[in-house]
Amino acid sequence: MFEKLKEKFVGEMEIAEAHCDAPCGIYDPASARIAAEAALAMTKKILDLKAPDGSDAQASAAYNNTLTRYIVVKEQQAHEAKEHILVLWTDYFKPVHLEKYPNLHETFWKAAKLCSAVKVEVSLEHATELLDAVKEIHGMFWASKDRDVAWYTAG
Amino acid sequence: MITHRFSMNSIIKKAGTKELALYVLGRRTAFRVEGDSMLPTLRERDKVLVARKGNIGIGDVVLAEHPYKISVKIVKRVSAVEDDGRLTLSGDNASTSTDSRTFGTVSLESVIGKVTSKLK
């Protein structure tokens, strides 16, 4: 009897979504900061790397290998920084925050643009500006939660 | 009303006679689960019964309105009650729980009810 009742009711059942976007609400600009710091560190390493004499094949190979690795990591980390920044911008921050931080869009847009610049260029200036932009985001983020979280860097 | 007790209701049991009776009497509403974020507690296509009245506590599996998607209902577990009274909801599926930076806490008003049992 219950089976029949179940079938009767089950026909018009509403959906309860259990998809993977669990709203646990864990956001932290620290992820963007770590990636931006890594991109800055790689930029410095690339600029500091000395090219060997062309005659030494072994040294040349080692140099190319090291340089390529630095570039790959810079590329990855700058992209990762951009992803973290975009998540904060488009998911965490809400229209209500705009009233408190009128320069919110400008700050995030510039930060995202700097991530691209850090990828494309080997620019100490832009890599440093990116970390500064993340610091500004850190300030806005924690202020929006009425929390005083000190800025720090790993490097 | 929120209770800060931790619910032992981590497993959703199969509906017994009482639950089915409450369902027939209209005190429970049935929903079909879609998605894997509540594995292993709830599987895709599980049919769950939801009580619209009663207290909600940490550890309860609840049905709630999606914070942004109009008329979408989500099933998640209450993992924390914030200082401002809002609820943190999480999926049980560990592999998806890290993918969670999507939309913040939800208000108590958005909770439709508690999942009390499953039909199959």
Image: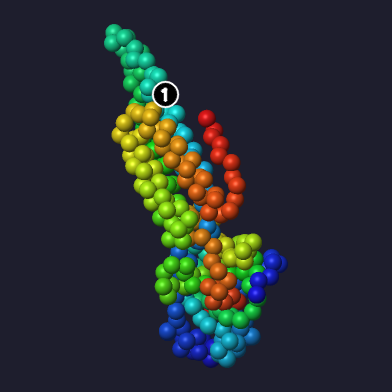
**Mark 1, residues whose alpha carbon is within 10 Å: few (<14), some, or many (≥20)?**
some
Q: Is residue A100 above or below residue B4?
A: above
Could you tell me which chain the residue with mark 1 belongs to?
A: A
Quadrant in the picture for residue A118: top left
Residue B39 in sight: no
List x then y, in percent, for residue A11.
42, 84
Drawn side of residue B71 relative to residue B18, left or right = left
Quadrant in the picture for residue B16: bottom right
Quadrant in the picture for residue B4: bottom right
Q: Is residue B50 above or below residue B36?
A: below
Residue at point 47%, 69% (across, down):
B66
Residue furthest out toward the right: B5
Instruction: From the viewer's side, name the closer residue of B47 and B82.
Output: B82
Quadrant of the image containing the N terminus of chain B: bottom right
Residue furthest out toward the left: A54
Residue at point 41%, 35% (across, down):
A129
Q: How many marks?
A: 1
Residue located beneath label 1 in the image:
A45
List x then y, in percent, for residue A7.
46, 86
Drawn side of residue A25 relative to residue A123, left or right = right
Residue A3 in sight: yes
For badge 1, the amino acid type reads Lys
Drawn side of residue B44 relative to residue A53, left or right = right
